[in-house]
Amino acid sequence: MPKRVGIEVSLAASEAACAADTDVVAAYPITPQTHIVEHLSELVADGKLDAEFVPVESEHSAMSVCVGSSAAGARTFTATSSQGLALMHEILFIAPALRTPIVMVVANRALSGPISIWNDHSDIMAERDVGWIQTFAENGQEVFDLIIHAFRVAEDPEVLLPIMVNLDGFTLSHVIEPIEMLSASEVKRYLKPYKPQMVLDPKKPVTMGPVGMPEVYTEAKRQIEALLQGSKKVVVKAWKEFAKHYGRTYKPIETYRMKGAEVVLLTMGSVSETAMTAVDRMWDKGMRVGLLRFRLWRPFPLQEFRRAMRGVKVLAVMDRAISYGGLGGPVFTEVRSALYGTFEQPQVFGFVAGLGGRDITVDMFEEMVKKAIRYAKRGKGPTYEMIGVRER
């Protein structure tokens, strides 16, 4: 039986990469991700993981190493956060174009300026269009599981795309939780040895990532889009297989107390567990409120989302990032677009909260719901609204 231990979530992420028998780790420290690669260096130094640990001079270099090692056929892992993810931006587009199945953990943290080391989703929302599969964890157990799942999906011959596993910085990364740790032998029941489909080999020279002239560039981009959209069936299949092996079930869209709900909250990440407490309290007050969470963010699970929203009258979307000069938070704008033209199109209202690590409380969720109900009765509301802003 798998052993449940109390462990810091960042260290559990490292242990998951170790249990997956990672071949190469490209490492550059940045708060609050540092503990992940730091612990992996210990695992390699202690002989518990037979891997090449590559300390680099920047996150840009870290992703460059990942692309090179993955292209050479190595199972590759890295982790980053915030400004580090932003520094990787140039290379992030190259990874899916070269079909390199890298797994990267992102400890979500606010972007500068002003400088903040605390959590929100501004870093990952700035990278939503880079062609990577993206999943979100709510607790430590999910972090461990989603990393194992990520390797399984990324390396599938039908996919061969990189994956980001998102976890909230500090809020999740630095807490100690009871986690059911899977050993390397237990993971092997689910995750088979990596057999690369395309490999850089001096004995058999090939070209990867050449110049894309106008005659081929559009088709190359269309291919990435087709692969990313097509990866969803593999993502779902791999989650079903995971449930058969280990008894824990994951879905692209996950819900809580949606039956009979007239108003629904939409969240992503660890704050969803606080939202569950808020939902319970509102039901106790006679308010019929449900909760919907994205487990899979890219590719966007359109059909699953629309099914989950059937019968819902009002949707309150909580973003943890701002789309400056836009029409609301990035999740809000995508969700509203996804629901446009549906048979029972609900009224959708956007709220931004928790920027730069500011607490999001049960009372704040109740405030969002009450405002959404009030705006729905009026038939209109603000384009979006920031919650918890000090006026002075």
Image (cartoon, rainbow, N blue to C red):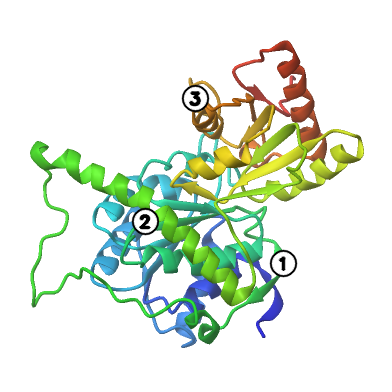
- What secondary structure is marked by label 2? loop
Residue 62 place in picture, x, y as percent: 35, 60
The amino acid type, in three-letter code, at marker 2 is Ser
Tell me where residue 66 sits by quadrant: bottom left
Question: Mark 2 or 3 closer to N-term?
Answer: 2
> Is residue 65 among what the camera can see?
yes
Question: Mark 3 or 1 closer to N-term?
Answer: 1
Residue 171 place in picture, x, y as percent: 67, 52
The amino acid type, in three-letter code, at marker 3 is Tyr
Residue at image location 49% in from the left, 28% down from the top: 337
Residue at image location 54% in from the left, 32% down from the top: 335
**Quick check: 233 left or right of 267?**
left
- What secondary structure is marked by label 1? strand
Rendered-image quadrant of the N terminus: bottom right
Other residues around mark 2 within 10 Å, as few (<14) / some (14–19) / many (≥20): some
- Residue occupied by mark 3: 324
Disc 3 from disc 1: Cα separation: 36 Å
> Is residue 118 among what the camera can see?
no
Q: Is residue 15 above or below residue 366?
A: below
Q: Nearer the viewer, residue 249 or 51?
A: 249
**Quick check: 194 left or right of 327?**
left
- Residue occupied by mark 1: 177
Q: Is residue 136 above or below residue 206?
A: above
Disc ID at residue 58: 2
Disc 1 from disc 2: Cα separation: 30 Å
Tell me where residue 384 sits by quadrant: top right
Disc 2 from disc 3: Cα separation: 28 Å
Q: Is residue 33 above or below residue 277?
A: below
